[in-house]
Image (tube, rainbow, N blue to C red):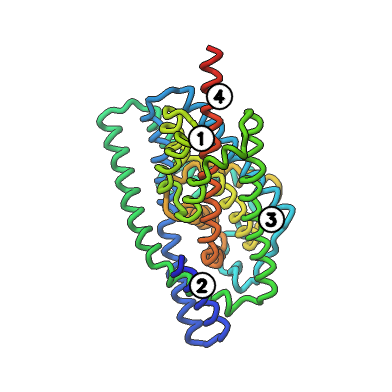
Amino acid sequence: MVLWLGALAVGVVLGLFSIGWIDGTMNFIASVYTRLFQLLAVPTIVLAVITTLSSLGTQKDSGRIFGTALKYTVLTTISAAVVGLLLFIIVAPGNLPQGVSGTSALYEISEYSQLSYKEHFLSVVPNNIVRPFLEGNVLSLILIAFAVGMALAKMKRTEGVDIVIKALNGLQELLFKLIHWLIWTLPLGILAFAEQLAAQVSAGVAADSLGKYVFVIIGVNCIQFFIVLPLFLLLRGINPFRTLGKMMPAVLMALFTKSSAATLPVTMETAERRLGVSSKVARFVLPICTTINMNGCAAFILVTSLFVMQNGGVELTLPTMLLWLVLSVVSAIGNAGVPMGCFFLTLSLMTGIGAPVGIMGIILPIYTIIDMIETAENVWSDSCVAAMTDHDVRTKSASD
């Protein structure tokens, strides 16, 4: 974090000086990072969705526990996306200056915005297994990945099926390594993007537009954290203050590690020892939730996608926003522990429709703060799902 914040500060200072050769160098570096993000984005989301869904077929525990946890996972994730959509409509972040958003450089947006909803739906349904990969049509790829993942989950585990799943997991591990290398060099990218922003953007316009965008993102997470999730608990007769107090060690660790997977051992121990969730539920539900219960990610994908598309000239009608609400929920559930997963998933979606992905570079310098807040919310949501599942299972068992 020190490196990221340091790179952000240095980039802003360099941009304020507006020195020609520095501006040119930073523009070149920013372009390189944008292309690298685009390179890794599409395979990231495809492999994440397939491997996440296929893993559901290996679960041998109680179907009742899994069904209950899945129900609450879907409900909380949808609620986060709905809150994000409502807050985006209310706050209405403005557009960045055209020179920064790069709307004139990408012609696909104009074609996309001219399609009727029927034509757009048909364009999502693939008629060739190879073409969506070649064209980077991420909407079609998500549909394919969802179908393949569900098919693998339902198939009997023969030797051939196991080989396919192991190969996909191996490809995902390879992708993780490439992403790890890219993240390791990200301070240089942040330096370049921050310099670009400071050098090219009118401070007043940028502050207004980006400020409202950040306000929406943080506002969604706060509303979901302090209002929506406690309401879910109250509806099940669970004290939200006691639950949050007991789970605070895991929530705080998630805030600083920015990894719900790394926090998982603490989350499980805290849920069992402090909150009193049965080990059968905690050890089954929490690992699954760490993979598929991404409230903060769903809100980030939806709000950021709408913000980027708006800057690209797409008319954000209600049907369009509802379509992207569904896509954000599906993408978030498919975010299988990928480093900076929400960022890469959103980038892949925007790449697929030809949106001005350069805006993602402007968001990148502040993403580390957003990531901290989202991870804390995700772990709090995992804890709520585990508590509600444990409550329902105990109640059902008592009635039986």
Q: Position of residue 196 (x, y in %)?
A: 54, 76
Q: In 3D space, how far apart are the residues under numbered discs 4 and 2 (Cα atoms)?
A: 47 Å
Q: Nearer the viewer, residue 242 or 205?
A: 242
Of labels 3 and 2, the one closer to you? 2
Residue 74: quadrant of the picture: top right
Q: Amino acid at mark 1?
A: Leu
Judged by depth in the image, the label closer to the viewer, 3 or 4, is 4
Residue placed farthest to the left in the image?
159
Residue under pointer 3: 315
Task: Give the residue at mark 4.
Answer: 392
Q: CA distance from mark 2 to mark 1?
A: 40 Å
The amino acid type found where label 3 is placed reads Glu
Rendering coords of residue 107 (x, y %): 57, 63
Residue receiving disc 1: 275
Crowd rating for badge 3 (residues with CA inside 10 Å; few <14, some 14–19, many 20+): some
Task: Classify mark 1: residues with Cα within 10 Å, few (<14), some (14-19) or many (20+).
Answer: some
Percent x, y of residue 390? 51, 27
Label 3 with label 4: CB-CB less than 8 Å: no
Element type where label 2 sits in the image = helix
Mark 3 → mark 2, Cα distance in angstroms: 32 Å
Task: Using the numbered discs, state the Cα–Cα distance from disc 4 to disc 1 in whole angstroms.
Answer: 15 Å
Which label lies toward us, 1 or 3?
Answer: 1
Q: Nearer the viewer, residue 7 or 398?
A: 398
Helix, strand or loop under label 1 = helix
Q: Earlier in the sequence, mark 4 or mark 2?
A: 2
